[in-house]
């Protein structure tokens, strides 16, 4: 069983839609939860991070962590064609020396 | 700030040869660097962690004699794929972190990746 599970999609939505991306995990020691955006053949770019449980909002993006369910989400409001990319969740333990465990990534296309 | 570069961006080599990939932190000191491998439509898999001046720590299942990592300075780490085979063809990505700055694991910056094709 993978430590982090993410639906690979692909996910296709019309411009302006609300997008919901999700990951589940099995390791209860994870404390840091990150979302990265990766364009084709490029390195990942950090979008948001959350420590422990709770919500965090940054512009059109909202990250949620539910540690009791071992479930994290990223919401994108008013999605734009420029949001088309692969979105990766990543997690880390407090004592892992910053080692990241990634989900498989969800490929998102926002159609104009 | 916090820019990481990789060179080359794309390399083609013949089976049995070795190829070196460089990862540089351009505007900060990278006390720790990570090397990942990503196959098409798959996630990033951590291969190894290197701390400046120390031997790299490899993840389970990664052959340390095949993937040689050197982190001799605070701004440069290299990954050498020795005796490359077609199954080594992949996208190799590094990330760099300045542990002295503190912060969490999100405080690491990724390079643009190197596409390796072994023929």
Image (cartoon, coloured by chain):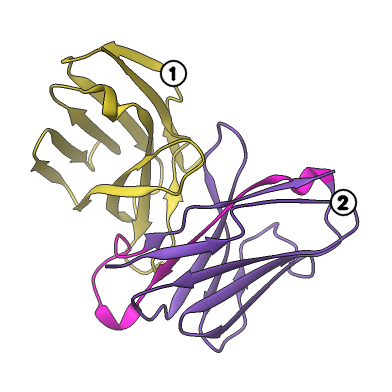
Chain colours: A yellow, B purple
Of B92 and A93, nearer the camera is B92
Magenta stretch containing residue B97, yes or no? yes
Left or right: where B19 falls relative to A96: right
Q: Is residue B81 above or below residue A27?
A: below
Of A91 and B86, nearer the camera is B86
Residue B22 occupies which quadrant of the picture? Answer: bottom right
Identified at 36% across, 57% down, the residue is A92
Residue A55 location (% of width, % of height): 11, 41
Residue A31 location (% of width, % of height): 27, 56
Q: Which residues are magenta?
A: B86-108
Q: Is residue B64 above or below residue A44?
A: below
Identified at 16% across, 47% down, the residue is A53
Q: Which residue is mark 2?
A: B14
Label 2 secondary element:
loop
Label 1 secondary element:
loop
Residue A65 occupies which quadrant of the picture? Answer: top left
Q: Which residue is mark 1?
A: A10
Q: CA distance from mark 2 to mark 1?
A: 34 Å
Identified at 20% across, 38% down, the residue is A66
Instruction: Using the image, name the chain to which the residue with label 1 belongs.
Output: A
Magenta stretch containing residue A73, yes or no? no
Residue B21 location (% of width, % of height): 64, 64
Q: Nearer the viewer, mark 2 or mark 1?
A: 2
């Amino acid at each position: 069983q993978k430590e982090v599970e993410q639906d690979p999609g692909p996910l296709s939505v019309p411009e302006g839609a609300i997008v919901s991306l999700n990951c589940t995990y099995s390791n209860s020691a994870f404390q840091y939860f990150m979302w990265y955006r990766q364009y084709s053949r490029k390195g990942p770019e950090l979008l948001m991070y959350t420590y422990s449980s709770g919500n965090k909002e940054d512009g059109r993006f909202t990250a949620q962590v539910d540690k009791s369910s071992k479930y994290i989400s990223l919401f994108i409001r008013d999605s734009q064609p420029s949001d088309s990319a692969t979105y990766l969740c990543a997690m880390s333990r407090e004592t892992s020396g910053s080692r990241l465990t990634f989900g498989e990534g969800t490929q998102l296309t926002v159609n104009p | 700030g916090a820019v990481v570069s990789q060179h080359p961006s794309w390399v083609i080599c013949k089976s049995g040869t070795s190829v070196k990939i460089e990862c540089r932190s351009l505007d900060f000191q990278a006390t720790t660097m990570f090397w990942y491998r990503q196959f098409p439509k798959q996630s990033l898999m951590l291969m190894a962690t290197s701390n400046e001046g120390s031997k790299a720590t490899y993840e389970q299942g990664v052959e340390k004699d095949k993937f040689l990592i050197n982190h001799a300075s605070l701004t440069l780490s290299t990954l050498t794929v020795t005796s490359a085979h077609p199954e080594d063809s992949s996208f190799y990505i590094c990330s760099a972190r300045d542990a002295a700055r503190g912060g969490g694991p999100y405080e690491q910056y990724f390079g643009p990746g190197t596409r390796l094709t072994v023929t």
